[in-house]
Image (cartoon, rainbow, N blue to C red):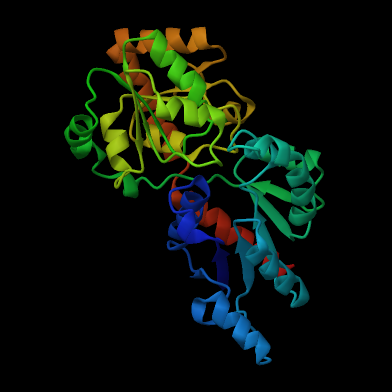
């Protein structure tokens, strides 16, 4: 079987959650009998594909199933081609109205019209995949007129090998010491940057957020405020060359996000055996258990107590980290590959 696994704007999304999810799908499929192509265009270039179309040739490659990971015009073109030529179409719902809000300046105003577009767009699919049961419920509430099925994004543990060896280098580089509270990924207000910084102001621990942030007019007011004038014990690193350095340098992964479809960085932190502190939101109920593989909090006071508890009890940090590593193992790429191969076989046999 030949499958298209397509991520529009891939070069710009390399360090995003969507980019990571697509890479992990492809890595997972390497363990299967599925042949994967990553570009729908003949010669791998949309410009050349357009020239082919003008000359009367199809701009599209041949594949048995189309699996798309974004929602833009390139993906829409693939979707229309698939429907015209009876190629099964799978749309992967990494974007929802709910998790789009709070991402950048103006995103809250755009969330409602985006929701109407997503309802129409995802309804074109033969099957919609999404990262969690929570996201399935969100999509069905729109409602999306297509079957929706959750498949974990998984975690690429091999890509994290050797993170321990980078601990000293990255702690020295960013002047970190003691119990380091950290986050990984793009800095957004939706992901809890205000809570992150307020907690730093109320405690004496070193805080580090490893990941890029916007500085231009598209940046939200909260992101501009905190990254331009952070508390004295907060470091915003910006882009880092090796994400393993973040997991090497940090001790307690703090993720006070307000909305997620799954949260790949949580699984990465767990795979590295880190103690994890999460906001108690619905999506995390299906994956993680408070007091076993993480601590969940609802208020800033609860977050502060959790950090103080972990600072004073290294054994608890170790126990939570060990259980977290076991949880992450349930999301191995081998399992993701098996699920995707079965899905492809199902949609091509109908």
User: Looking at the image, is 246 positioned above or below residue 241?
Assistant: above
- Residue appearing at x 40%, y 24% in the figure: 229
- Label count reads 0
The answer to whether one can see residue 133 in this image is: no
Q: Quadrant of the C terminus?
A: bottom right
Residue 91 placement: quadrant: bottom right
Q: Is residue 285 left or right of residue 16?
A: right
User: Looking at the image, is 43 positioned above or below residue 304?
Assistant: below
Q: Position of residue 73 (x, y in %)?
A: 67, 63
Residue 314 placement: quadrant: top left
Q: Position of residue 135 (x, y in %)?
A: 67, 39
Q: Quadrant of the N terminus?
A: bottom right
The answer to whether one can see residue 13 in this image is: yes
Relative depth, front residue between 290 and 15: 15
Relative depth, front residue between 32 and 147: 147
Relative depth, front residue between 141 and 102: 102
Q: Position of residue 214 (x, y in %)?
A: 47, 40
Q: Position of residue 265 (x, y in %)?
A: 44, 37
- Residue appearing at x 63%, y 74% in the figure: 64
User: Looking at the image, is 119 positioned above or below residue 104?
Assistant: below
Q: Is residue 127 left or right of residue 327?
A: right
- Residue appearing at x 34%, y 14% in the figure: 316
- Residue furthest front in the image: 217
Q: Is residue 30 left or right of residue 40?
A: left
Q: Is residue 299 left or right of residue 120?
A: left
- Residue appearing at x 53%, y 27% in the figure: 222
């Amino acid at each position: 079987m030949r499958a298209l696994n397509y991520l529009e704007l891939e070069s710009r999304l390399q360090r995003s959650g969507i980019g990571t999810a697509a890479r992990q799908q492809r890595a997972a499929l390497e363990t299967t009998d599925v042949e994967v192509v990553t570009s729908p265009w003949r010669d791998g270039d949309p410009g050349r594909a357009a020239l082919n179309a003008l000359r009367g040739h199809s701009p599209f490659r041949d594949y048995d199933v189309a699996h798309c990971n974004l929602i833009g015009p390139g993906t829409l073109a693939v979707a229309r081609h698939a429907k015209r030529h009876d190629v099964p179409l799978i749309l992967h719902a990494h974007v929802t109205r709910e998790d789009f809000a709070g991402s950048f300046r103006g995103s809250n105003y755009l969330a409602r019209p985006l929701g109407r577009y997503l309802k129409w767009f995802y309804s074109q699919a033969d099957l919609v995949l999404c990262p969690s049961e929570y996201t399935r419920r969100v999509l069905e509430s729109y409602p999306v007129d297509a079957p929706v099925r959750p498949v974990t994004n998984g975690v690429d543990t091999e890509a994290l090998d050797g993170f321990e060896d980078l601990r000293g280098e990255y702690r020295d580089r960013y002047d970190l010491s003691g119990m380091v509270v950290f986050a990984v990924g793009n800095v957004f207000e939706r992901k809890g940057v205000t809570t992150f910084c307020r907690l730093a102001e109320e405690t004496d621990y070193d805080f580090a957020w490893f990941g890029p942030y916007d500085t231009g007019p598209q940046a939200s007011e909260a992101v501009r405020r905190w990254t331009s004038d952070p508390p004295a014990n907060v470091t915003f690193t910006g882009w880092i060359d090796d994400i393993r350095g973040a997991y090497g340098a940090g001790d307690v992964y703090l993720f006070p996000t307000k909305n997620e479809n799954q949260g790949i960085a949580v699984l990465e932190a767990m795979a590295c055996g880190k103690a994890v502190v999460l906001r108690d939101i619905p999506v995390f109920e299906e994956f993680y258990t408070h007091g076993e593989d993480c601590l969940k909090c609802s208020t800033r006071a609860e977050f502060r107590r959790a950090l103080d508890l972990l600072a004073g009890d290294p054994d608890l940090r170790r126990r939570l980290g060990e259980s977290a590593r076991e949880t992450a193992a349930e999301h191995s790429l081998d399992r993701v590959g098996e699920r995707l191969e079965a899905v492809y076989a199902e949609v091509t046999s109908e």
